[in-house]
Every structure is written in C-alpha cells, then in structure tokens.
Image (cartoon, rainbow, N blue to C red):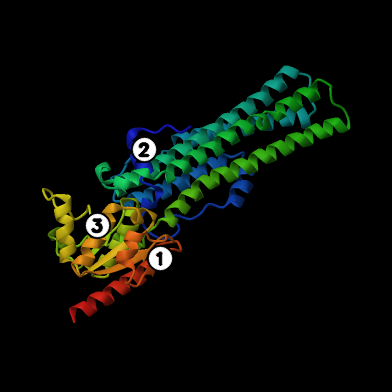
Amino acid sequence: MTNFTDRQCFFTITAVRAFSTGGFGAGQRLSVTGFVVFGLITFWVYSALRFASALRAHFERRRQEFAAPPGSDGFEARWLVPAAAAALFALTAALVAGWFYNWILVGDASSYGGIMAAVGLSSLLFYGATLLLCVWALARLRAHEIAELALHEAAPASAGEAALSDELVRRWERQSSQVALFLVVAAPLVFSPALGAHLWLGGELEGHWALAAAAACFAAAALFHIWGTALLVQLYNSHLAAEARHARPAAAAAAPRPAHAARGAHEVFVSHSAKDKAAAEAVCATLEASGVRVWMAPRDILPGVTWGEAIIDAIAAARVMVVLFSTASNASPQVLREVERAVGKGVAVVPVRIEDVKPSKAMEYFLSSPHWLDAIEPPLAQHLERVAHTIRALLDAART
C-alpha cells in the first residue's frame, strides 16, 4: 500500500517530530468502547460517520493552527467516501434484516437461490464498505501528516542530515501492513454466513452441527467487528500520539518570530544537527517567548551571505551558545566546528542533552567543563522552561 512521491519522501524522512502545538495532539482520543457498542447496533453506519466527523474536526483545528487556507489538501476530509461506506453498511443491514426475517424467523427456506443471493450480497457489500472506509482513513491521515510537515518544514535544500531519518515511513508501512492483514483475514470472516447458509440449506448440517455452525458464524462476526473497530480507532489515536510525542508547547509554538531575529541582533546561538531541527525550533521558540533573542541556522542566514560567514559572525555576536547534544550532533563535524569557535571566542557554552549519548573525544574536549542540562526523558516540552530559566540566568549574570 505504500507508494511515495519524491515530495512525500522528503517530508516523511524529515520525521514525524516536526508536528507542533501542545496537549495530546490536537484532539480527543477516540474510545473503542463507543465504537464497538454503537457500531454493532448500527452495522458500522455509526463507525463510518463518527470516524469521519472526528477526522474532519481534527483536520479543521489543525488547519487553523497552521493558518492553512480553507480547502488545503491534507486538512480536509470530505463526506463523500465515508457517506458512501455508511450507505453500503445501511444497505447491508437492510438485506440482513430481510433474509434473517424470512429465513430464520418465518422459516421460509424454499428458495435456496434467493436466500444465498441475499446472504452473499450482504456479505459482499459489508466487506466492500469496510475496505472503502479503511483505505480512505489510512490515505487521509497520511495526506494530513504530509501536509503538516510541508507547512512546518523549511525547503528541501535545508533538510541536510535530516534526510536520513525514516521514522514516519516505518510507521506508515507498519500501519499499511496492519490494515492489509486485517482486510485479508476479514474476507473469510465476512463471508462465513454465506458458507453457513449453504451448509444449512443443503441439509448437510443437523442438530448440534447446525448449532456449531451458527455459533462459528457469530464468533467470526464478533472477531471481525472488534478487530476492525480497534484498528480504525488506533489509526486515529496513533496520529494524535505521534503529534503529542513531538509537540512544542502551545505558547512557544504560537510566539511570533521577533523582528530582531531578521536583523541579526541576538544573545543566544543555538547549535544543532539538522536531524534535531524540531527540537531546536522548540528550544528557540521557548527562549524567544521568554524574551531571549536567538540566532539559529538556517532561519537567520540572510540572503547573499555565505553559510560559513554567517555562522562565524553569529557566534561572535552571541553571549551564550546552546548545544543540543544528541547522537546526530555528537557525530556532526559542523556542530563540533561551531562549539570550537564558541570556546575560542569566549562564548558560554550550555550543552542540552536530548539523548543519552557519550560525547566523542573531540566533543568531550570542548564540553568537559560546562554544566550539562539533561532533557533526555520525553517529552522535550517538560524540560524547556528549565532550559530557558538557565539561559536567562546566564544572560543576566553576563549583563551585570
């Protein structure tokens, strides 16, 4: 089911950590219990419409947070597909009620062909509606995540080392595999009533065997219903969980970029690997929300200025360098050069450890004396105020 375009590949490999704003994603988790109960009563009509409603509400809220224009691809979920699925589920319910009444309650089994046609058609319609709903949900959530990344990330040329990350791609492939497995196994489960009807009407089953066949059909239907419901709800909740794990505080994320950033007036230089871009942006946003002036590449590199020149000038103008220390930055020659220049120019260096990694010998040489700030335990958001407080204290001390 995975089929990525070049544009999709860029945004997916930059990693799911780019999602913004706090809370548990930007919506409430769906409850499996409600979907199981009401989905069963309504033959999944409720499931299709309720899921679409939750998805549309979530997409609209995110569209407003990202200030995306109305109708933006990835931030809309039209009713056409879920409404079609709900209509198929409703038609299935009508067919099942019809053949159940005539065959089971009334006992009219004179027309083998008619009953088999009704049972088989109801099974086919139900499976088709399920296939339509699952594939639609997977596709819309995938398009939504791509759209969020597209609005959050910089141009592909700035991705740098981040192009090696494939967290989101692996998650999508895992979800696609789960949906594919369910749809494959669901086929015999959904069509089990047709098999049971054939065995019953053909007179091949009697007594206890007939009861066993009926019980097996009910068990197959229950397995399909619970498994499918849990899978559908999990697709939505896992998206919220992905946003929450990599969220920035809402206040920091909403803080506008100060005008001084464009002019180059700053007090703090944020050194980071491109793979930690989302974490760097979260630190930057928190510091700027608290009134600290920050410089960070590539955001503050002016057009026409070479990368190296801009970095050297920014380090020289800073009072404090915040180093986001991770596996990626520990192995980054660029981060090492920035730290070396900061130490050489007498800039205070504050390492913020976002991964439990032992520094390389070269990095340890420059970072052996400063006090380390640990922000290893996720989510990062819980550590940002402490980082901002430490930086403000250092700047206050430097001004006196």
Taking 158 as reference, is 390 above or below it?
Answer: below
- Dot 1 lies on which element? loop
- Image coords of residue 234 (percent x, y): 54, 47
Distance between the alpha carbons at the discs numbered 1 and 2: 29 Å
The quarter of the picture where residue 218 lies is: top right
Residue named by callout 3? 337
Q: Report, in whole angstroms, how far the alpha carbon at label 1 lies from the one at label 3.
A: 23 Å
Q: Which of marks 1 and 2 is nearer the N terminus?
A: 2
Comparing 177 with 51, the one in front is 177
Q: What is the crowding at mark 1: few (fewer than 14 residues within 10 Å), some, or many (at least 20)?
A: many
Say which amino acid is labelled 1.
Ala
The foreground one among 163 and 133 is 163
Give the vertical position of 105 relative to 113 (above or below): below
Can you tell which of label 1 and label 2 is closer to the viewer?
A: 1
Residue ID for mark 1: 375
Displayed quadrant of residue 316: bottom left
Q: Name the residue under label 2.
A: 9
Asked whether the beta carbons under mark 3 and mark 2 sit within 8 Å of each other, the answer is: no
Q: Where is residue 184 in the image (x, y as percent from the top left)?
A: 60, 31
Tell me which numbered mark, 1 or 3, is placed earlier along the sequence: 3
Amino acid type at image mark 2: Cys
